[in-house]
Image (cartoon, rainbow, N blue to C red):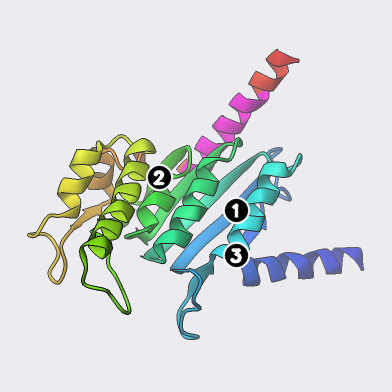
Amino acid sequence: MADQEKEEQKNNEIKEMGSINLDENKSSHRIKLLTIIGEIEGHEAVSGNTKATKYEHLLPMLAEVEDSEEIEGMLILLNTLGGDVEAGLSIAEMIASLSKPTVSLVLGGSHSIGGPLAVSAQYSFIVPSGTMIIHPVRSSGMFIGVEQSLRNMLRTQDRITRFLSKHSNMSQERIEKLMLNPTELVKDVGTLLEGEDAVKEGLIDEVGGMSQALHKLHEMIDGERQKKHKNM
C-alpha cells in the first residue's frame, strides 16, 4: 500500500509540477529533475489551452531543494517561448542562488526570458537543434506613452542583460548588440542562436543532450562530496 501511495504521489508531482526525484535509479546521487516548459506564467493566468510553468509552484520547490539534506543536485530541462519577465527573473535568481550543483539543458528552445533561466544553472547545455532568442523587452496591455515608461522598460532590459552577462561568458555589450539586431528576425528585432552558435557566443557552456547533462551533474556532485569530506 505504501508503494502504491508513493507511486501516486510521484505521478501527481510529474503531472502538477513537472518534476521528479531521480533517486530511485541505480545512481547513488539524489537528483531533482525540474522542467520549465511552455509560457512562464506571472501574476496573471495564461489561457487554459496554453502550456505554462507557474512561478508560485517553482519557488517553494526550489526552496525545498536548497533546504533538503537528501537532494544533492538539480537538472533543469527547458523548452519555453518566454513569458512574464518578473516571474522569469525571480525563478532564475532563485536557481542561481542555490548552493547545490545545478545543470540546465535547453531542448526545443529557451527564448526571451527563457535565456536567463537557461544560464542560471552552474553549467548549461543545449541540444544541436535547440534555439535561443534574444530580443528587447516587450510590453503587453496598456502602455503610457511618457518618458518614465520608456526608462522603466530600459531598466528592465538592463536587468536582463546584466543577469545574462553575469551567468554566462558573454559581455553585456555583445548581448545588447544581438538584442537590437534588425536583420535576423522577420517580425521582430533580435537574434536567434542555434545550439552551436549559442555556445560559440558564450551564452551556453556546451552542446549536448541528456546523457552529457547528467554526466556533468554527477561529476559536480562528486566534487561537492569530496570538498565536504576534506572539510570534515
Residue toward you, 161 or 156 = 156
Q: Are marks 2 and 1 in contact (CB under 8 Å)?
A: no
Read off the residue under disc 1: 33
Residue toward you, 162 or 217 = 162
- Residue 56's place in the image compared with 121, above or below, is below
Read off the residue under disc 3: 56
Span colored in magenta: 213-225
* Viewer-side label of 3, 2: 3
Is 10 one of the magenta-colored residues?
Answer: no
Q: Amino acid at mark 3?
A: Glu
What distance separates the C-alpha of mark 3 from that of mark 2? 21 Å
Relative to residue 104, is residue 199 drawn left or right? left
Looking at the image, the residue that sits furthest to the bottom is 48
Q: Amino acid at mark 1?
A: Leu
Q: Position of residue 5 (x, y in %)?
A: 85, 68
Residue 211 seen in this snapshot: no
